[in-house]
Amino acid sequence: MGKTKRGKGSKVMAISDASGFPIAVHVDSATPHEITLVAKTLAKRFTKAAPRRIVGDRAYDSDPLDTTLKERGIEMISPHKSNRRKARTQDGRPLRRYRKRWKAERLYAWLQNFRKIVTRYEYYASNFLSFVLLGCMMILLRNYF
């Protein structure tokens, strides 16, 4: 038996601003690591300008990701993993922004209010992405008007 047609699940990758409002959303399979999906998510952003900083959790502690984002002019802020073998690259000043990461996590909490997003009823990923985008639009409209 191989994988089913639907796969093992889906992963919603989102980038939000400092207030928790969505900037970019991408839906992909649940198997790849988040580091590999950052570039795809940045390519699907709603705004013209790229964000100056991205705050992520310990899973985003990757030197290749840091260099790739630095080439684009984006600063990656994430605490180091406890088992990191290479020298540390983050000092205390940028990590102060990490304490406010809960504001960015609000977007996921707001998306949990939509049952069609929480339980993926859609067979095709494009339809599921459409509902995620619709949820993001409703979040933006609810908070701006």
Image: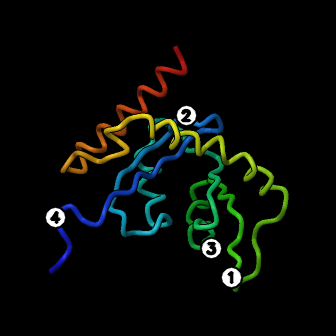
Q: Which residue type does callout 4 highlight?
A: Lys
The local crowd at label 4, few if under 14, some if 14 to 19, many if 20 or more residues have their Cα within 10 Å, is few
Which of label 3 and label 4 is nearer to you?
4
Which of label 3 and label 1 is nearer to you?
1
The local crowd at label 1, few if under 14, some if 14 to 19, many if 20 or more residues have their Cα within 10 Å, is few
x and y percent of residue 87 in the render? 76, 81
| Secondary element at image label 2 | loop
User: Circle 2 sits on which residue?
Assistant: 21
x and y percent of residue 35 in the render? 50, 66
| Secondary element at image label 3 | helix
Residue 45 got which mark? none
**Nearest the eye: 92 or 143:** 143
Q: Residue at x 60, y 72 (%)?
A: 62
Distance, label 2 to label 4, CA atoms, is 33 Å
User: Circle 4 sits on which residue?
Assistant: 5
Q: Residue at x 63, y 69 (%)?
A: 61
User: Circle 1 sits on which residue?
Assistant: 83
Query: Where is the N terminus found, in terms of image quarters?
Result: bottom left
The answer to whether mark 3 and mark 2 are in CB contact below 8 A is no
Q: Which residue type does callout 2 highlight?
A: Phe
Distance, label 3 to label 1, CA atoms, is 14 Å
Q: Residue 80: which quarter of the image?
A: bottom right
Upstream in the sequence, badge 2 or badge 1? 2
| Secondary element at image label 4 | loop
The local crowd at label 3, few if under 14, some if 14 to 19, many if 20 or more residues have their Cα within 10 Å, is few
Q: Viewed as shown, does residue 113 lie left or right of 66? A: left
Upstream in the sequence, badge 3 or badge 1? 3
